[in-house]
Amino acid sequence: MSPLPPNTIRVSGDRTDDINNIPAGIAICPGYLVEQYAFGAGLNRWRPNTAAADVQKPFVALDSPEWNHSLTPASLTSPLYAIGDLVPVWPMEIGDLGWLWILSGQNIANSDYLQSAGDGTLKKATATTAAANVVQFQSMENPGAVTVPTRIVVQRVA
């Protein structure tokens, strides 16, 4: 029997450092890698991260069932946080496990190294990106050929 998906973005990791007082600047899905940006008038907002070669500490948009923002619908075309919604965000530490998005068109095996795709999702790392030290994640599942955006369990490794 196959294990069920975790049904929560944070699979393991500390819950004391969550950030929950910054709104979305654009629509965001739980499981996205996100970054803060200056929205104007001294305000910050969250958006999906914008750099594939990003080496900053990864922040992950969480699900929040207490606000009726669960993981359904589980699709990148149906973001759960609209512009202006407060987004609970988790600063992912080395060793933490999360249920993050893999970009369509990837072929991922268990233990493959992953990096940001520059749009909130992850993609398979290449030898070039590994040499540039932008690899921050490792697959903990074996989804194989990913034909639609899919969440898989990943571990932060750097």
Image (cartoon, helix red, strand yellow):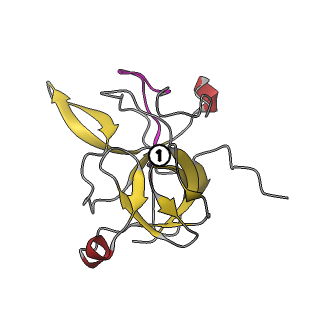
* Residue lying farthest to the left in this orientation: 41
Q: Which residues are magenta?
A: 80-91
Marker count (numbered): 1
Q: Is residue 85 left or right of residue 8?
A: left
Q: Quadrant of the N terminus?
A: bottom right
**Is residue 14 something that shows in the picture?**
no
Residue at figure coordinates x 46%, y 28% from the top left: 77
Crowdedness near tag 1: few (<14), some (14–19) or many (≥20) residues, C-alpha within 10 Å: some
Tell me where residue 52 appears, x and y as whole percent.
27, 55
Q: Is residue 40 left or right of residue 55?
A: left
**Is residue 66 something that shows in the picture?**
yes
Q: Quadrant of the C terminus?
A: bottom left
* Residue that mark 1 sits on: 18
Along the viewing direction, whichever of 19 and 152 lies nearer the viewer: 152
Q: Does residue 119 lie above or below 132 as drawn?
A: above
Task: Answer whether residue 15 is magenta in the image.
Answer: no
Tell me where residue 147 appears, x and y as whole percent.
52, 47
Task: Answer whether residue 90 is magenta in the image.
Answer: yes
**Which element carries disc 1, helix, strand or loop?**
loop
Q: Is residue 50 left or right of residue 84?
A: left
Along the viewing direction, whichever of 98 and 3 lies nearer the viewer: 3
Residue at figure coordinates x 30%, y 27% from the top left: 25
Q: Is residue 87 left or right of residue 116?
A: right
Q: Does residue 127 lie above or below 3 as drawn?
A: below
Residue at figure coordinates x 39%, y 32% from the top left: 21
Q: Does residue 87 lie above or below 154 as drawn?
A: above
Tell me where residue 149 appears, x and y as whole percent.
50, 43
Along the viewing direction, whichever of 115 and 26 lies nearer the viewer: 115
**Amino acid residing under circle 1:** Asp
